[in-house]
Image (cartoon, helix red, strand yellow):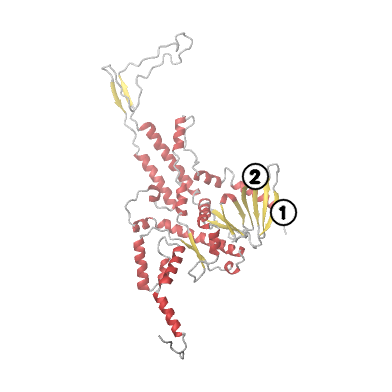
């Protein structure tokens, strides 16, 4: 049984680690900055005018949130079934009771963007509690990086009404609430709640099983290149796209005012300096009565090269992220469903890999939820698997035609083909089963035959 002193000491160590991974110069903070659009500004020379700095701020073109959002939209758990079962297992009710249909995106996005995410599972008065935990709000210690359960973990809860910082220290038996008050230098133990699950109840989700920082961090360098290309394009548009004019054969006037006022008290700082004879602007003409004057203009800067550099950067970003370039550029129009599916094949294969990795963690979460609900049978069922919604772009007509041929030519049961219809949910399938069972004439005929066969042979026939 750990003592209060050992609990506070361990909590203090994990709190320092949590603050370290969220410090301003940490990888997590840099990823968060770039996702929020707070990028490193493109290079500007020392002493650059304010106009250059404003262009540098406008040059930020944040593609990174679209990268993770594209993968998140393709990852949606739609059911949880035991082996050789056609309906969802009991543990699926815990999932839906905790609104994880919508909240699963929190842990998916955290794992994709920061490399790791968590779910916290604890017993509750109304059933087990499943809470998604973002990577920036938790730290976990594993004795071996491949261990299924952490030895202990820490979750940041937030601030209390009195300003104290609240944390939860987790181990295999209890949840310890830790507080750091404003007037205290060390954390203090506030409460202890036993969960008695036998495991530290924090389930880890990883974008990659070995040393991943997520999908965003490797793309930051390319994002900076894109911002530099946009900055150069803006400078070209601002200063070089308008044709600069020149004039010769003109007498340049000189400012001969010694003072700026009639009283002669305010000296003219521009005394003796040449005065620009024309005000260059896109809506102004240059006119002179000097017959010897000559006018001309310089050619404007061609911005095609800047646009090509920008598009090349976006395509490189898409290639490294394993996205189809049309997701970012939108340059594919009037495509058939088959052509669109071929363009997204690489992305779908990567999403399939995430489904395998995240699916194991989801199954671990649901087994732990069953254990918290004292459902030992479901907690030991390692054959049950989550069912992912089919989000691949396919023609509905072509899919239904192929499934119909599977049923007719290969003898696949019709109910087995329902799951493969694009966009169909488990709720749709359950409703179809009820409708199919109520209207199935073959089933009713078989039931009548069974009743007749069960009638004794020496039974006296009833009069009609």
Badge 2 is on which residue? 161
- Tell me the CA gap for discs 1 and 2: 27 Å
Q: Can residue 284 be seen in this snapshot?
A: yes
What residue appears at the point 33 percent right and 16 percent down from the top-left corner? 251
Q: Can you give x and y, in whole percent of width and height, for residue 314 in the image? A: 41, 46
**Mark 2 or mark 1, which is nearer the start of the sequence?**
1
> Which quadrant is home to the C terminus?
bottom left
Q: Can you give x and y, in whole percent of width and height, for residue 331 in the image? A: 35, 48
Dot label at residue 6: 1
Q: Can you give x and y, in whole percent of width and height, for residue 74 in the image? A: 45, 56
Q: Can you give x and y, in whole percent of width and height, for residue 332 in the image? A: 34, 50
Neighbor class of circle 2 (other Cα within 10 Å; few <14, some 14-19, many 20+) is few
Dot label at residue 80: none
Q: In which quarter of the image is residue 271?
A: top left
Q: Which residue lies furthest to the bottom in this view?
A: 458
> Which quadrant is home to the N terminus?
bottom right
What residue appears at the point 36 percent right and 56 percent down from the top-left corner? 340
């Amino acid at each position: 049984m750990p003592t209060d002193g050992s609990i506070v000491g361990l909590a203090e160590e994990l709190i320092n680690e949590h603050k370290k991974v969220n410090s301003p110069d940490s990888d997590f903070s840099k990823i968060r900055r770039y996702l929020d659009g707070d990028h490193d500004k493109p290079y500007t020379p020392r002493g650059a005018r304010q106009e250059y700095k404003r262009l540098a701020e406008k040059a930020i073109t944040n593609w990174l949130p679209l990268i993770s959002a594209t993968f998140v939209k393709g990852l949606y758990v739609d059911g949880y079934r035991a082996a050789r079962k056609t309906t969802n297992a009991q543990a699926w009710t815990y999932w839906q009771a905790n609104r994880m249909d919508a909240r699963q995106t929190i842990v998916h996005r955290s794992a994709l963007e920061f490399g790791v995410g968590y779910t916290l599972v604890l017993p509750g008065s109304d059933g087990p509690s499943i809470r998604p935990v973002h990577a920036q709000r938790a730290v976990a210690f594993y004795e071996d990086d491949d261990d299924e359960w952490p030895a202990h973990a820490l979750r940041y809860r937030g601030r209390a009404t009195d300003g104290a910082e609240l944390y939860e220290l987790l181990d295999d038996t209890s949840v310890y609430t830790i507080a750091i008050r404003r007037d205290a230098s060390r954390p203090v133990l506030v409460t202890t709640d036993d969960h008695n699950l036998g495991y530290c109840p924090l389930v880890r989700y990883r974008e990659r099983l070995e040393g991943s920082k997520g999908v965003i961090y490797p793309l930051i360098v390319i994002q900076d290149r894109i911002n530099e290309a946009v900055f150069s394009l803006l400078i070209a548009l601002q200063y070089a796209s308008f044709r600069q004019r020149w004039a010769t054969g003109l007498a340049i006037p000189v400012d001969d005012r010694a003072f700026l006022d009639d009283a002669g008290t305010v000296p003219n700082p521009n005394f003796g300096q040449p005065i620009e004879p024309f005000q260059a602007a896109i809506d102004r003409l240059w006119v002179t009565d000097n017959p010897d004057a000559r006018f001309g203009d310089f050619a404007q800067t061609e911005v095609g090269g800047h646009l090509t550099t920008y598009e090349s950067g976006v395509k490189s970003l898409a290639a490294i992220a394993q996205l189809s370039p049309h997701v970012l550029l939108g340059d594919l129009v009037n495509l058939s469903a088959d052509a669109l599916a071929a363009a997204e094949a690489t992305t779908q294969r990567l999403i399939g890999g995430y489904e395998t990795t995240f699916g194991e963690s989801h199954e671990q979460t649901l087994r732990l939820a069953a254990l918290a609900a004292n459902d030992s049978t479901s907690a030991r069922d390692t054959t049950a698997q989550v069912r992912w919604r089919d989000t691949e772009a396919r023609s509905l007509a072509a899919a239904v035609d192929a499934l119909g041929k599977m049923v007719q030519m290969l003898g696949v049961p019709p109910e087995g083909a329902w799951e493969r219809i694009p966009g169909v949910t488990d709720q749709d399938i359950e409703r179809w089963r009820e409708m199919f069972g109520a209207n199935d004439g073959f089933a009713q005929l078989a039931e009548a035959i069974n009743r007749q066969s069960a009638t004794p042979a020496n039974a006296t026939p009833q009069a009609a």
